[in-house]
């Protein structure tokens, strides 16, 4: 206790007493995560205000042997940002590192700190008539540090890539408290190993990202958004192929939704309505972006007409106004929250090779039906990336807790089908605490060994987010 | 000698006697590189025919303590593929790993072995009406394994990224002979550390890439290519900005060339001619790609007209035929070879933040003029990526050997200017043996330490391409 008190005093000297939280009422908000699956305890929360302070905090932890759980906007879905139950881990919140250090329009880059929210980063790009394309549901509260530590995906990966592809460089505090300056505004730099990408997606287990250099893109001048009804995922994939052939990288989003998901949204979101006259088994929300102010409504209409004639699609609506586009997107964005009133939901964030999506969907749905008759599959997501959020809502009227106790068994059913298609059990959410045991089962054992060797090399004492990933 | 003989016998048992070369006449071709700067000796050349054979060769070397120099098409420009002078290193040529294992159009991916040439990989994509966008001068002989090991760049990085961004996964033989299967056809996979990118660009010092999963893109239906004359690099950058704003990612190449480079090409390549009526101080070769068969000639013509009116450009020619496009591109592609008849050339493969290119060019040219009056700067390259091949031809009539002895001193002059602009001393060619000492001077010392820790973790005995990179 005395030791612990000395440790906290040292932290207070670094970050200021008001930025070392120990009051349970203040700490509580840092101990939970959006899905309520993980709940830990913490020695304290440290809130450094600069990279130098992060470095000093980490060095202090290294000396004291205190484990660190880095935390950004606390929106992660796999428990990576939550401490364990020991009460001996220090949460290091990066939220006070919230400066946009530099927006360099000429270099098409900006340097932002880890605690800047994604929405703030997007706004900084918009302010100079540029686009920072990363876009996901929690963008109002998730932070750039978390986005990079988890290699976030979202709705624009098809054209722009994952968070990893949007970063030119990072600044990282290492396990011993040293600062590695890998910030760069260069588009090409082949001077040595790709350290940036080692820290991106490592979920804070190899170092703490404190800032990043991010790519800026030309801001699109027009968007064309279509809400399409169709018979099955095969046809959705055929439409994607037609669109990619005709529009290439201008296809910036291509989302898949099932009828049941739409019905959940209608029940959940007042004022939501079906854009199409009749119900269809499946839907895609596709968006094209153009640098031409004339936009692509006309050729998109032609393409949809052709798809209709061929029987690829059954119906389609093109957004005529910004309001209509917003309404289309809200149907997609509300699909996660709309599952909550339907009782327990067991989640799977999976990917398979693009062409295997239809087979995966039918096989996994059949496997779930066999495993638990009445369970309702709500499979939606980023078809263009082969990434499906294969969520399973409980049978109507079932006991929620008893249902959720089937989490692991249901996972095994679904992930078995994923494995048959050489897919991934975590397409965009990461491993965290939730999928750590799963990882050992599915990952190439040699690759796992390499991961362990890297962890030992960069964090020999195992103090950076222990119990996560590995 | 006896030990060495037993070692070679073991190798022969693995790859076949005819694939262990020791005859100096046969080995000679593996000991030199395109620029003739490096020339080593080798214990032998082993030519495995499969990943399993590579693994067995590496395991044999690990046991015997023999260092390995992996080699692909032997086109690298920094000596990374050449053994040292000891005669104790084994060259492992990957060229016999030349199978295209799979082209999966539905997954928009193909899996090819390390020894497949870039041109063969491009052709495999073309055969299924897709594009593999990596494109560079040596594509007829360079191999995918080398492209990835050096994270090659080329003329389409602006729209598609470096070699790294074009790979979905790799298969790697580790230092102990184990095979890490990181092949994947997934667009999204957040299951653990990004091992793929650690091996890509590591120049064979952390493992040997034996195969790769590569992205396929929709094949463009039309290209529009313009050869533009202008007064200075500032204006070239302004034109790039106009083009990116108007055409976004459809701008697939944007190359910069100086008048002197064009004159060197005229002198070197019979039949080459100036596409423009009058000489201009600088030129850009810009190319747009479109999925629309109608192409972008019309809006490009409009953009160039606007740029002419504004005084951004002085003249422009649009390629009207495929032959004309080819002629434009040959002017750019011949620019390296055209320097050879002009005597010694000291090379710099540098990058700076995009907006800093004009300042870099004028400052570096002034510094060279001050250092060596009469030396002729031929600065050309990938303006869209901020990557300039800042080559300096000897003063006319100077002694070539004496000139080349100034390599290090000239480097110091140019790299000093690069450093002032936070640039890179190796934008796309890598470190190899050529820039190993330079790297120590310019790299963040903490980053260098991390690199060393990774090397120790993955190749503790230091047998993978020793003396390269680190």
Image (tube, coloured by chain):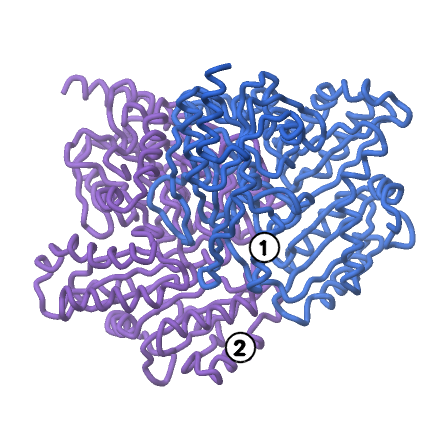
Chain colours: A blue, B purple
Image location of residue B134, percent across then percent down: 45, 52
Residue drawn at x 70%, y 33% is A34
Image location of residue B232, percent across then percent down: 35, 75
Q: Nearer the viewer, residue A122 or B69?
A: A122
Q: Is residue B267 above or below residue A459?
A: below
Dot 1: chain letter: B
- Disc 1 is placed on an element classified as strand
Residue drawn at x 34%, y 78% is B274
- What is the spatial separation of the Cα atoms under label 1 and label 2, in whole angstroms? 25 Å
Q: Is residue A310 above or below residue A169?
A: below
Residue beneath disc 1 = B218
Residue beneath disc 2 = B303
Dot 2: chain letter: B
Asked if residue A446 shows in the view, the reply is no
| Mark 1 Cα-neighbour bin, 10 Å: few <14, some 14–19, many ≥20 | many
- Determine contact: label 1, label 2, CB under 8 Å: no
- Disc 2 is placed on an element classified as helix
Image location of residue B215, percent across then percent down: 53, 46
Q: Nearer the viewer, residue B378 or A336?
A: A336
Q: Quadrant of residue B411?
A: bottom left
Q: Is residue B59 above or below residue B26?
A: above
Asked if residue B162 shows in the view, the reply is yes
Image location of residue B382, percent across then percent down: 39, 61
Left or right for A319, reference A187:
right
Q: Nearer the viewer, residue B304 or A31?
A: A31
Tell me which label, 1 or 2, sits earlier in the chain: 1
Residue drawn at x 29%, y 45% is B431
- Name the mark nearer the viewer: 1 or 2: 2
| Mark 2 Cα-neighbour bin, 10 Å: few <14, some 14–19, many ≥20 | some
Do marks 1 and 2 both belong to one polypeptide chain?
A: yes
């Amino acid at each position: 206790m005395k030791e612990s008190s000395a440790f906290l005093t040292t932290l207070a000297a670094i970050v200021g007493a008001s930025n070392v939280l120990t009051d349970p009422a203040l700490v509580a908000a840092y101990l939970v995560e959006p899905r309520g699956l993980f709940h830990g305890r913490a020695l304290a929360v440290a809130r450094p205000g600069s990279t130098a302070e992060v470095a000093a905090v980490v060095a202090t932890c290294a000396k004291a042997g205190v484990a660190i759980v880095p935390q950004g906007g606390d929106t992660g879905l796999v428990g990576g940002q939550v401490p364990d139950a020991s009460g001996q881990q220090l949460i290091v919140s990066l939220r006070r590192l919230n400066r946009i250090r530099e927006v360099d329009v000429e270099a098409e880059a900006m340097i932002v700190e880890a605690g800047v929210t994604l929405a703030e980063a997007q706004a900084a790009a918009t302010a100079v008539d540029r686009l920072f394309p990363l876009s996901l549901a929690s963008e109002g509260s998730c932070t750039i540090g978390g986005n990079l530590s988890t290699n976030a995906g979202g709705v624009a990966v098809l054209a722009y890539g994952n968070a990893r592809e949007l970063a030119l460089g990072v600044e990282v505090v290492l396990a011993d408290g040293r600062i590695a300056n890998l910030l760069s505004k260069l588009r090409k730099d082949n001077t040595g190993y790709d350290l940036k990408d080692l820290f991106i997606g490592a979920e804070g287990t190899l170092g703490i990202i404190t800032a990043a250099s991010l790519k800026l893109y030309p801001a699109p001048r027009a968007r064309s958004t279509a809400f399409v009804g169709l018979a099955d995922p095969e046809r959705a994939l055929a439409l994607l192929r037609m669109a990619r052939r005709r529009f290439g990288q201008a296809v910036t989003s291509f989302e898949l939704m099932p009828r049941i998901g739409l019905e959940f949204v209608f029940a959940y979101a007042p004022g939501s309505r079906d854009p199409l006259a009749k119900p269809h088994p499946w839907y895609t929300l596709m968006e094209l972006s153009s640098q031409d102010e004339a936009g692509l409504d006309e050729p998109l209409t032609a393409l949809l007409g052709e798809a209709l004639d061929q029987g690829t699609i059954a119906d389609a609506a093109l957004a005529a106004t910004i309001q209509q586009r917003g309404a289309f997107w809200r149907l997609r964005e509300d699909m996660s929250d709309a599952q909550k009133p339907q009782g327990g939901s067991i989640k799977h964030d999976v990917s398979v090779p693009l062409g295997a999506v239809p087979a995966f969907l039918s096989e996994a749905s059949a496997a779930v039906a066999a495993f638990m008759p009445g369970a309702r599959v709500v499979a939606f997501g980023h078809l263009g990336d082969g990434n499906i959020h294969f969520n399973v809502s409980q049978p109507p009227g079932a006991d929620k807790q008893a249902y959720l106790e089937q989490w692991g068994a249901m996972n095994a059913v679904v992930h078995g089908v994923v494995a048959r298609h050489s897919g991934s059990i975590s397409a965009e959410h990461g491993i965290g605490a939730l999928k750590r045991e799963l990882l050992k089962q599915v990952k190439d054992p040699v690759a796992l060994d390499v991961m362990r060797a890297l962890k030992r090399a960069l964090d020999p004492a195992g103090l950076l987010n222990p119990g996560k990933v590995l």
